[in-house]
Image (cartoon, rainbow, N blue to C red):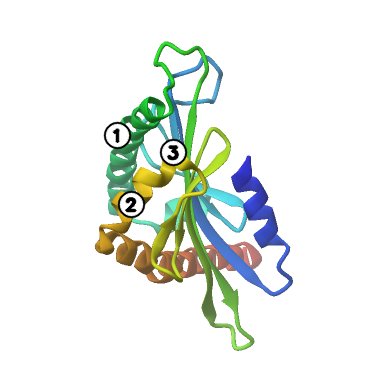
């Protein structure tokens, strides 16, 4: 997938870079494959899955012991509500995209809408974390569809089918401001917090 290529490119950076990103994947229809759901959302820290949500269980769950131990019950409840809202949003918008691309609902093909967003920080020589990069982009059927350009505060549409969405989102300045703020501030905050949780767990293992 295109997102895997993007992530591998980030991973080749020689300096100490830490990464937190989330991937949401929606299918146009359910398929009968074990472990494959119509909607899935996963949090990933430094190439390690840390939480998961799927359209069958409809609960955000930890995938690392330290995530479960360090985060309060309220964190998981709010996360579950957020993921359920995302699932509804994807269900509506994948149907809109199919109509826009003249893809019939009776089409036997399964179409895929993905969203990946997150941030990277660089660890400085004094041990502090500094914002390095942020990304927020959508893919449809394995191809780039829409991406946020934080430098120019605008959405980039590499395909004609995304132009109407680009124009709509560009006309909502608060959306661009929120996206940039999340990538450079909120995401970095959570990345730093999760790294501390992970380090505490590692120290506990060393002392046990």
Check whether the beta carbons of the residues at disc 1 and disc 2 lie within 8 A of each other.
no
Which label belongs to residue 88?
A: 1
Q: CA distance from mark 1 to mark 2?
A: 23 Å
Residue 200, given in percent of the width and then of the height, sits at: 53, 67
Q: CA distance from mark 3 to mark 2?
A: 11 Å
Residue 38, given in percent of the width and then of the height, sits at: 44, 26
- Residue depth check, mark 1 versus mark 3: number of the one nearer the observer: 3
Q: CA distance from mark 1 to mark 3?
A: 22 Å
Residue 96, given in percent of the width and then of the height, sits at: 34, 31
- Of residues 154 and 17, the one drawn nearer to the viewer in this rendering: 154
Residue wearing tag 2: 167
Which is more N-terminal, label 2 or label 1? 1
- For image coordinates 49% across by 26% down, the residue present is 111
- Residue depth check, mark 1 versus mark 2: number of the one nearer the observer: 2
Element at label 3: helix
Task: Examine the image and state in which quarter residue 188 appears.
Answer: bottom left
Depicted 25 relative to depicted 171: above or below: above
Residue 182, given in percent of the width and then of the height, sits at: 37, 64
Which label belongs to residue 141?
A: none
Check whether the beta carbons of the residues at disc 3 and disc 2 lie within 8 A of each other.
no
Task: Examine the image and state in which quarter residue 128 appears.
Answer: bottom right
Q: Is residue 90 visible?
A: yes
- Crowdedness near tag 2: few (<14), some (14–19) or many (≥20) residues, C-alpha within 10 Å: some
Residue wearing tag 3: 161
| Quadrant containing the N terminus in the rendered view | top right
């Amino acid at each position: 997938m295109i997102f895997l290529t993007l992530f591998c490119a980030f991973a080749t950076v020689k300096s100490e870079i830490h990464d937190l990103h989330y991937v949401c994947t929606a299918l146009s229809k359910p398929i009968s494959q074990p472990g494959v759901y119509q909607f899935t959302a996963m949090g990933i820290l430094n190439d390690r899955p840390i939480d998961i949500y799927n359209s069958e269980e409809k609960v955000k769950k930890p995938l690392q012991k330290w995530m479960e131990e360090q985060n309060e019950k309220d964190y998981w409840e709010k996360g579950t509500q957020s993921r359920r809202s995302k699932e509804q949003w994807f269900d509506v918008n994948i149907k809109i995209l199919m109509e826009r691309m003249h893809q019939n609902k009776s089409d036997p093909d399964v179409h895929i809408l993905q969203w990946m967003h997150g941030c990277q920080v660089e660890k400085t020589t004094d041990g502090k974390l500094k914002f390095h990069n942020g990304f927020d982009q959508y893919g449809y059927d394995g191809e780039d569809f829409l991406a946020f350009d934080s430098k120019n505060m605008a959405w980039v549409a590499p395909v004609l089918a995304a132009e109407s969405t680009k124009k709509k989102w560009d006309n909502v300045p608060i959306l661009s401001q929120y996206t940039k703020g999340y990538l450079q501030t909120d995401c970095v905050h959570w990345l730093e917090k999760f790294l501390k949780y992970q380090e505490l767990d590692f120290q506990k293992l060393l002392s046990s």
